[in-house]
Every structure is written in C-alpha cells, then in structure tokens.
Amino acid sequence: MNQRMLLRNGNVIDGTGAALMPNTDVLIDGDRIVAVDPTPEFLNAEAIAGLTVFDASGLTVMPGLIDSHCHITFGEPASNDELFFHREPATAMLLAAFNVQKLLRSGVTGFLDADCIFNLGPALRDAINAGMVEGPRMTAGMNALLTAAGGTAGRLIPDGGQLGYAHVMRDREEMVRTTRQQVKYGADWIKIHATGSVPNREGELTVWTLDELRAVVDTAHDLETPTIAHCRNAASTRLAAQAGVDLILHASYLDDAALEAVVESGAAIAPTFTFLANLADHGAKVGAATHQVDIFRGEIAATAAMLRRAYDAGVRLLCGSESGFSLTPYGHWHARELEVFVSTLGLTPLQAISCATRNGAFALRMADDTIGVIAEGAAADVIVVDGDPSLDVTLLQDRSRLRRVFCRGVQVDLDRPWPERRALPGEKVGAWSAQPLTWDVVNP
C-alpha cells in the first residue's frame, strides 16, 4: 500500500543529467515525490509523525529504470520456432504475469512492450493498473504490422493474417483498418516492422514504402496514438522519420541522410544494443551460434558513431534491453544498455542514466518532468542503490545492490526468493539430436 516515506541523507541522482546531490532527503507521499531536500520547517514534528524513515546514508537514490524495449509476452524463447509454434494464449498470459514481477525486482519501474504475441499487451497493462498483477508501469502495443515480405523470422511469417507477434498487411486499406482496430482495443503504440530478413540477402531489407508507412502513421496520429518502427538499415530509418514515426528502434547503420531526417522529424531512437552485445560478448557461454560475432560488433560500432552525432544534435535516446529472449532473460539485462551507451557512444554515466530514466518518459507517454526524475511533484518511482552509478553504471545490473524499490509509491518486497519455474509442457523444441547421425560420425 502507499505510504509516506522519508529517504534520509542519500546521494541523489535526479535523472536530468545533473551532478549527484550528496546528503539529500527525498519525501514520498503516495504516488508522488512531494519534496527534495525539504527544509527543517517542512519536516516539523507534525509532518514527521506517521512518516516511515529510511536512512539512505552512503546509498544512491535515483529514479527507477524505464525499459523502452521489452517483450514481456515472449517468454524467453531460444528460437523463432519456439516463439511462433510453442505458445498458446492462456499459458502465454500466465507466463507474462509470472515474469513481469522480475522487472520490478530489478529496479525497472516502467516499460514499453511495443509488440506482443496474441495481442496480450493491453490486457496485461490493465491487470497491472488494476492491482491484479504485480508489475511496473506499462505501455503496450499489439501485433507488429508487417508486409508479406516479413520481419526477422523470414519465411516463418505467413503471407497474410496473424501469427505470434505478427499481423501481415495485404494492402493499404488493411493497414489503415488494422491501425484503427488496434487503437480501439487499447494499444498505446502502433508498431511497424519496417525491415525484414529476406533469403539470399545480407542484413535486413526495407519492406515498406513511404506511402505505406504514412498510411499507418497518419491514421494513428489522427487517433492520438504514437507509432514505433523496427529499422535495421539506414534507408528504413530515413523513411520512418520522413513518415513521422515517433520512436525508431535500432536505427542500424544510420547514415547522414537518415540522421538528417531524424533530426528534422524530432523522432526518438531506442538503439537496443543489448541483445547484440550479449550475443557477441557472452553467447559462447550458453552455446549460442557465434559465427556472426564480428558482424554484430561491427553493427554496434558503426551505429554508435552516428548515434553519438544524433545525441549531440538533440535526438532523444532511450534505453531498451529487448528482454524476452533466451539471450536477454527477464530481470537480468535491463540496465546493460547504459553500459553500452557509456562504452560505445562515449556518454557519461549521468547522461546514460538520463536516457534510461527521464528520456524513458516518452515511452510511457508521459511528460519528462513527471516521471523518471527525482523532483517535487514527479511520480514516486524510485530506487535506492548501494554504490555510485554516476561513476559506474554497471552497478545497476547487480540486483544484490538494490536496497529499496518504489513503484507508484509502493515499496516492492525484495526479500522474497527470486521467482523460479519449470518448463511448461511443449514449451521447448525437443531436438532428436544436435547434428545428423551420419555413418562418418560413428566411424571417424
């Protein structure tokens, strides 16, 4: 339940990029921060009565993290086969409700799930808001809109209709109609897969035209709903910006023309390097295919150089983890994007923290002075960390350093055992073997 809480003598990072404020008090009342470093007169005997006081001396008080790219309904599949053919709606929703609590207990107090399987996102969001499911603040999309050329799953994507997270558009009329339907059924965002994997082609190709993108964007904007686009090449990023897309995911291999279009349009970018970085740096530890490691590292390096120029030009950068796959399981990597922003973009830790807090207000469709900041009147989404993330953002990846988490002013129980489960029947692909049993294997 909500309570009045005084976090006393903490070192405050306010999320704006400003310097750390030592020995500062933060007063929380319900779902609001009502004062930062209140005066002695403010904290008179009458005011202190009924307060819960937590001594944060030597600890860091900062806004909760906002993960702007998280697939909460995917359930950590190890392949597209598992994602598309080993999920069904009822168990997928139960699994999402089980997993979403892990975000809170990792210091994530808000997240955007832009596309989901079985269109479960809005229902989960509403269940969280109603207090039925424990989870962070959430904004939700529904199925991603694709053309028949597909998305990242190649030929697993059908030529029309719905499968998994995908809804394949046959023509412009369907694009407009589906966008309206998604808004009708509660989508906070409309997501477009602007690029896709096509056989015998390197990388991802742009699979939407400018006119098609504008059909969706204009329809969504007419219904006061923002749009988001998956763009893994420069041309798609340029077209998305020209079409008026509000948030661009990845923006891979950004070039000068695409950067100019993004700056002119005012679009935000969530690069989501974490999946690529995890695969490149740690994939071998879990048996992941690593033959493309150099390609992944090259994509990060090439994109980061341009994204730094975008940041310097005033483009809003958001942090997203793409949690929801076996390489980015829930509760473990939500803060890694900050590390990559510091190491590859050259941002300071405080700048990276701002991308993961205040800038994330955009993903939640809230003003950036109302959430993701430690300020009077802002939402009471606050974490208390052992250590100084303004010097080392990797501390935020270590759950054991979390001392307090507040979301909507409610303190999260961090003392419970971490949620564990067994695999659901039929959830995983059952391979007969890891390789063909040829005669030569038996007789080398």
Image (cartoon, rainbow, N blue to C red):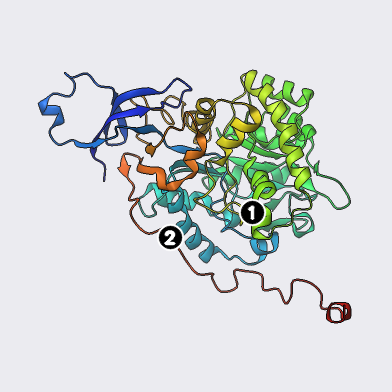
Choose top left, top right, bottom left or bottom right for residue 84: bottom right
Please name the residue shown 55% across and 39% down the image: 68
* Disc 1 residue crowd, few under 14, some 14–19, many 20+, Cα 10 Å: many
Q: Nearer the viewer, mark 1 or mark 2?
A: 2
First along the sequence among labels 1 and 2: 1
Q: Name the side, left or right, on which 404 lies relative to 140.
A: left
Q: Is residue 202 visible?
A: yes
Q: Position of residue 433 (x, y in %)?
A: 74, 75
Q: Does the residue at mark 1 contact the one at mark 2 (Cβ under 8 Å)?
A: no
Give, as a three-letter code, the residue at label 2.
Answer: Pro
Q: Whole-Å distance between the Cαs marked 1 and 2?
A: 25 Å
Please provide percent x and percent y for residue 342. 59, 31
Residue holding disc 1: 165
Element under disc 1: loop
Task: Look at mark 2 in the image and give the residue it sits on.
Answer: 419
Question: Residue 228: x and y, percent?
Answer: 63, 37
Residue nearest the viewer, comparing 31 with 192: 31
Which residue is outermost to the front? 444
Residue at the extreme left: 45
